[in-house]
Image: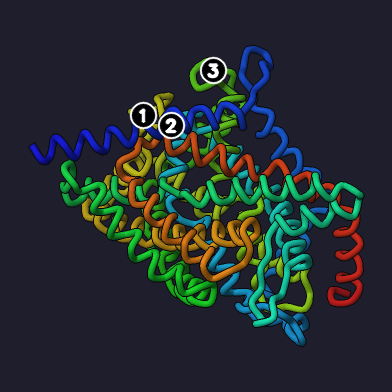
Amino acid sequence: MAETESVTLAQHIDNAVAPVSRAVNSVIFYSIDVFGVSLPLVVVWLITAAVVFTLSLRFINLTGFGHALALVSGRRKHHLKGGAGEISHFEALSSALSGTVGLGNIASVPVAIAIGGPGAVFWMILAGFFGMSSKFAECALAVKYRRVQEDGRTIGGPMYYIEDVFSRRGMKKLGKVAAIFFAVMAMGGSISLLQVNQSYAQFSSVTGISGGNAPLLYGVILCSLVAIVVLGGIRRIGFVSSILVPSMGVLYLGAGIVIIILNAPQIPSAFATIFHSAFGLDAAGGGLAGALINGIKRATYSNEAGIGSSAIAHASVKTSEPLTEGFVASLEPFVDTIVVCTITALVVIVTGAYEPYLFHPPNHGIEITSAAYESAFSWFPIVLLVASVLFAFTTLVSWAFYGAQAAAYIFGPSKKVDVVFKISLCAVLSLGAAISLSSIIDFIDAMLFGMCIPNIIALYLLLPELKKDLAAYNAKYRK
């Protein structure tokens, strides 16, 4: 009887969330019909901006790559003298990566392949490549327009440069509305239920513990641990992330590379399948349009380029030169999408683990990746369980910080606002395992793409200023 009541409670929660997710998603992803395919305008908005920034900044994603590595490794330190901020470049990158590298790579990649076909991988990689320029722009500007408080703490993010650039053009009220809209969407995006949902899915699959109070109990335990860390602020987040993120990345990528090597004969056909599907016109999955839309959606969820979220973490970096953090931040989409997502995709494709789920609703994510890894190592689902919990933990920690900074912008940067928001967020997140994956994806996609609307408008307005800053920086430091 207790189990029936618990299942009913979980279903009740899902039934309450699903209509809201669908309604919000339908507004943000307003679509037009193009050759019989429904094309969301916000997807076009995001990828077009990434291409424009890449061209305007003269392929900064390529020309600045080596300089970015030198900065994050500490080989270039010209930017440290007299700089405000609280954390190092490496900690800022790790904090931001902890919000991007995670279950978005493990669970979101197979979702993209299942819905849009293997061709979605091509568009994911392309979105990651151009997204490096978007990330450079938003993070450099977030540092430039951040606010330094009397106690030395920094607060920053797109909401500040959105408000400022509109205000300078005589549109102060519109700028405030746009910045608040961004902050509200960021607070919604911090409800990263997918992390709880998919880590529990792997936990349940490996341990066999499911039903009853298990989903809610799992969520409560995980989110209680998250609360302990996030209440410690960005210094604790940076410290924890700088330790966990690299070790998780090595563990997950190492195993993926081994599986790819073991399936080396299938690699050429895997790439052929990806390219054929990317430009195919098959009705299933929407053909080219279906692969493109789903590829960009999942790349955006994974690397967050153009939506402005990780710029909030980068705004806390210790530097006197804002553009240095732009260079460092541009590494995120490269690591997250071009490296980690590609390895996940190849593992899923060469093992054929995605085929039973092809062109079906997104009700399976991490299960597909787990099956792919298990085909080579029968024991790997246990390793993936550990990795998925750690990935979920660090992502939840980072997004809690993003949401708290957004709340501070709306309600004022007080300790009370920070604590109330973080505790409330962790309470909501604890319900994640009881909500269906499709409802979670609808909600999160809507929040993230909603953030990109005012963010990209502000980036366009600030682009001439950013180009001048870049030219001056290059003349001074990159002769």
Residue 103 is left or right of residue 431, and the answer is right
On the image, the x and y values in percent for residue 190 come to: 51, 52
Q: Earlier in the sequence, mark 2 or mark 3?
A: 2
Seen in the picture, residue 141 relative to 126 is either above or below; the reply is below
Return the residue at label 3: 282
* Residue lying farthest to the bottom in this orientation: 81
Seen in the picture, residue 387 relative to 119 is either above or below; the reply is below
Q: Quadrant of the C terminus?
A: bottom right
Q: Residue at x 26, y 48 (%)?
A: 216
Q: Quadrant of the N terminus?
A: top left
Return the residue at label 2: 114
Label 1 sits on what residue type? Tyr
On the image, the x and y values in percent for residue 397 come to: 46, 63
Is label 2 in contact with label 1 (beta carbons under 8 Å)? yes
Crowding around mark 3 (Cα neighbors within 10 Å: few <14, some 14 to 19, many 20+) is: few
Seen in the picture, residue 38 relative to 238 is either above or below; the reply is above
Residue 125 is left or right of residue 149, and the answer is left
Mark linked to residue 340: none
Q: Residue at x 63, y 48 (%)?
A: 128
Label 3 sits on what residue type? Asp
Between the C-alphas of marks 3 and 1, the distance is: 17 Å
Query: Is residue 146 in sight in this rendering?
Result: yes
Label 2 sits on what residue type? Ala
Return the residue at label 1: 357
Q: Residue at x 58, y 69 (%)?
A: 414
Residue 288 is left or right of residue 422, and the answer is right
Between the C-alphas of marks 2 and 1, the distance is: 6 Å
